[in-house]
Amino acid sequence: MPARRRTLIAGNWKMNGLRQAKAELRAVAAGMGGVGAELMLCPPFTLIAAFAADVAGTSLMIGGQDCHAAESGAHTGDVAAEMLKDAGAVAVILGHSERRADHREGDAVVKAKVKAAWRAGLLPVVCVGETLDERDAGEAAAVVTRQLRQSVPDGATADTLVVAYEPIWAIGTGRTPTTDDVAQIHGAIRHLLAERFGAEAEGIRILYGGSVKPDNAAALLATADVDGALVGGASLKAADFLAIARAAP
Ligand code: PGA
């Protein structure tokens, strides 16, 4: 990995966590000494401000899991990128497959949200990934690169984009692709990024997500073009999250 791409381990808490979960946050912050990777936790909206205040002064970053494309307005129940930023978030996960499925978010919506993240000064983590049927049909790379082409606006740089490859069939299932399959998709993503963003592509981090656990993290994180992980279930426990972070090369 070029020196410019610092490994990023991001935890996606999804719809998990009450205020008492701050104990896990504190355990991560207390245990991250000696970890070379950048660490980020993305709790639900309700915990962002409290978590961000709690880790102020440490290098642990706090991110959101979604935002609306607009800056403000009549959008009941939604949260603007500016609000995440105001609450202390530095990044936001966008286009997660659960958002794409549960809220019918298509690539155009994701693209508008990436622009909103840029407007607010947040780092977007843009998720792409194929279904099992698409993988079985040999279409994984085509699906993922199409999603990426349509979900990421022009003008992305190494400092303003993180991509997360998350095969839908690997999320929360305990199943993972082979490292050869991961390398192939990450290579295809890098190739597309180079086509679109030239030399910046070498610095854009591409995370793998989907059933990353302490026991498979070392192999996945050592795979070509894998610059970190987006971790769901295993990020809820500080010990597991830190074990994954320590597995980074
Ligand atoms: P998982 O989730 O690690 O629980 O499979 C990953 C994700 O959806 O980001």
Image: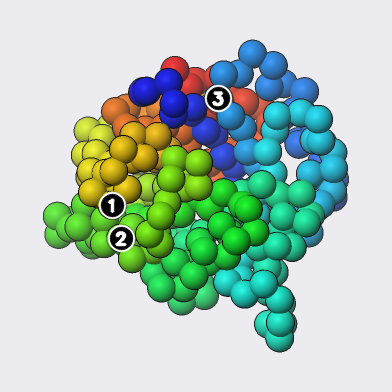
Task: First in sequence, mark 1 or 3: give its number.
Answer: 3
Say if residue 40 shows up in the picture. yes
| Figure coloring | rainbow
User: Which numbered disc, 2 or 1, marks the residue closer to the eye?
Assistant: 1
Q: Residues within 10 Å of mark 2 (few under 14, many from 20)?
A: some
Residue 196 is marked as 1
Toward the viewer: 119 or 113? Answer: 119
**Residue appearing at x 49%, y 27% in the figure:** 6
Q: Position of residue 86 (x, y in %)?
A: 78, 56
The residue lying furthest to the top in this view is 34
Q: Residues within 10 Å of mark 3 (few under 14, many from 20)?
A: some
Check the image and report above or below for 69 versus 209: below
Which secondary structure lies at badge 2? Answer: helix
Toward the viewer: 198 or 71? Answer: 198
The amino acid sitting under disc 2 is: Arg
Left or right: 33 as drawn, with respect to 38: right
Residue designated by label 3:
37
Residue 149 is marked as 2
Quarter holding the N terminus is top left
User: Which numbered disc, 3 or 2, marks the residue closer to the eye?
Assistant: 2
